[in-house]
Structures are given as C-alpha cells and as structure tokens.
Image (cartoon, helix red, strand yellow):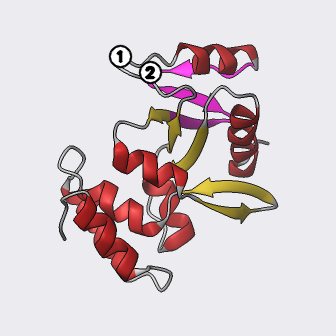
Amino acid sequence: MSSLADAFKVLNELKAAGVVGDYAVAGAMALVFWTEPVATFDLDVLVTLDPPATGLVSLESIYRWAEQRGYSLQAEHILIEGMPTQIVPSPDALADEAVASAVELDYQGVTVRVVRPEYLIALYLHPHASTAKRRERAAALLDSPRLNRALLDEILKRHGLSL
C-alpha cells in the first residue's frame, strides 16, 4: 500500500531528475509539520523551474515525467502513490522565497522540503490567495511555537502584506 512518505520520495526524485529546480510542500499538508493538521484532499507542492519560466508556464515536462513512471492525471492533479498532488509553479517572488527557504524535515524516514510557517502565513494572506479558510490557517500558525515572529514581520513588510 502506498503512503504519503512514498509520495514524498517521488517528489525528491522529481527534483533529482532535474524536472523541477526545487520544490516545497505547501498548503494544508504543510500544516501537519507546524500545527494541528486539517482535513485536506490533496498535496500542494510549490515548484521552481530551471531555467525560471517567463510568460505562459507549461507543466508538460512534469506531466510527461509522471506518466512515464505510471502516475495518472486526474484533472489538475497527478496521482502520486495514490495521493492527488497538485504541482504549482511559483507565481511570484514570495513563492520563490518560500521554496528557496523551505526546511528539510523527516517524515517516516523520508526527507521532505516544507514551506516554513512564516512563509505559509504570508502565502495565505496574499491577496490572490486569501480566503476565510486560509486566514484561519494563518491564525493557527501564529500560535505555533516554531514560528519566528521577527522573520514573519520582515516577510510581510517586504511583500506589502499585513495580518
């Protein structure tokens, strides 16, 4: 039976194969590492491309790589080891920073890159992504003992965001 750890192994292979420049788990699944977990349908993964994409971004190379390994596509998801996984190219400087500063953590013996809680909060507060659900997640992260409040304040200031 497949596991989330198996899906994380595949993400590491995606990076090692050079299909993406880097990746970091984001969204609700990242909360598992920082605060109380919340129910979620899928695994959201921010990626940077190498070379960086400009203009219209194609995920064709990622989809081709996945299909060659037997992973099927389902709407906007790739079913990686049974886990619906949404690969999201970094849309802006904030997301680029979130991926670049991701923390390598251990999940059942597998190294996985996870967006830091400070960047998750900033991403949740971004005007293009801010919803009531994401604001609730940001509030939960504010209580995390692992949160570096000074870093959060600096990120929010630099990107013109506020709590």
Please tell me which residue is depicted at 50% across the width and 33% down the height of the picture. 87
126 over 1 or under it: above or below = below
Depth order, front residue of 129/4:
129
Amino acid on which disc 2 is placed: Ala
Taking the magenta stretch, the answer to whether it contains residue 84 is yes
Q: Which mark is residue 56?
A: 1
15 over 72 or under it: above or below = below
Q: Quadrant of the C terminus?
A: bottom left
Q: Position of residue 103 (x, y in %)?
A: 60, 62
Residue 153 visible in the snapshot = yes
**On the image, numbered disc 2 is attached to which residue?**
75
- The answer to which of marks 2 and 1 sits earlier in the sequence is 1
Q: Is residue 131 left or right of residue 39?
A: left
Q: Is residue 131 left or right of residue 41?
A: left
Magenta stretch, residue numbers: 70-86
Please tell me which residue is depicted at 25% across the width and 47% down the height of the picture. 129
Q: Is residue 58 left or right of residue 104?
A: left
Quadrant of the rendered image containing residue 71: top right
Q: Are marks 2 and 1 in contact (CB under 8 Å)?
A: no
Label 2's element? loop
Amino acid on which disc 1 is placed: Leu
Taking the magenta stretch, the answer to whether it contains residue 143 is no
Q: Which mark is residue 112?
A: none
Dot 1 alpha-carbon crowd within 10 angstroms: few under 14, some 14 to 19, many 20 or more? few
Please tell me which residue is depicted at 43% across the width and 80% down the height of the picture. 148
Quadrant of the rendered image containing residue 96: top left
Label 1's element? loop
